Image: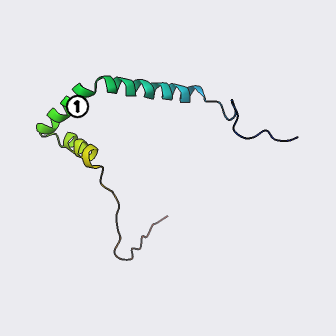
Amino acid sequence: MAGKGGARPGAGRKKGYKAIAAEKAREYLVRRIAEELEPITDVILASAKAGDTKSLEYLINQLIGKPKETLEVQEDVVLKIDV
């Protein structure tokens, strides 16, 4: 019996209820945030001006990007783990 693989309408695993619900929740959240973007931005900016460092960090990360969080090791390191 020959396989019927390949891209065709309806092929592949069907989305389960949880995947559909999560997708709809994300769409709803994106739409609501877009509708309320100006007041949300105003609150974040006001918080940053008031000294909220988390708000300030968020704004800077949005502006210039989040910094890399990598660690370079300059010498050999030996880890001993007791099992």
Residue placed at 21% from the left, 39% from the top? 55
Q: Secondary structure at mark 1?
A: helix
Q: Residue furthest bottom?
A: 75
Q: Is residue 3 left or right of residue 10?
A: right
Q: Residue furthest right?
A: 1
- The image quarter in which residue 36 lies: top left
- Where residue 52 appears, as percent x and y from the top left, is 16, 39
Question: Quick one: 3 or 50, which is closer to the camera?
Answer: 3
- The image quarter in which residue 4 lies: top right
Label 1 belongs to which residue?
Answer: 41
- Where residue 35 appears, as percent x and y from the top left, is 31, 22
- Where residue 22 appears, as percent x and y from the top left, is 49, 28
- Where residue 50 appears, as percent x and y from the top left, is 11, 36
The tally of labels here is 1
Q: Is residue 6 left or right of residue 66?
A: right
Q: Is residue 13 left or right of residue 57?
A: right
Mark 1 surroundings: few (<14), some (14-19) or many (≥20) residues within 10 A:
few
Residue placed at 35% from the left, 61% from the top? 70
Residue placed at 35% from the left, 23% from the top? 32
Residue placed at 22% from the left, 31% from the top? 41
Amino acid type of the residue that numbered disc 1 sits on in the rendered structure = Thr
- The image quarter in which residue 76 lies: bottom left
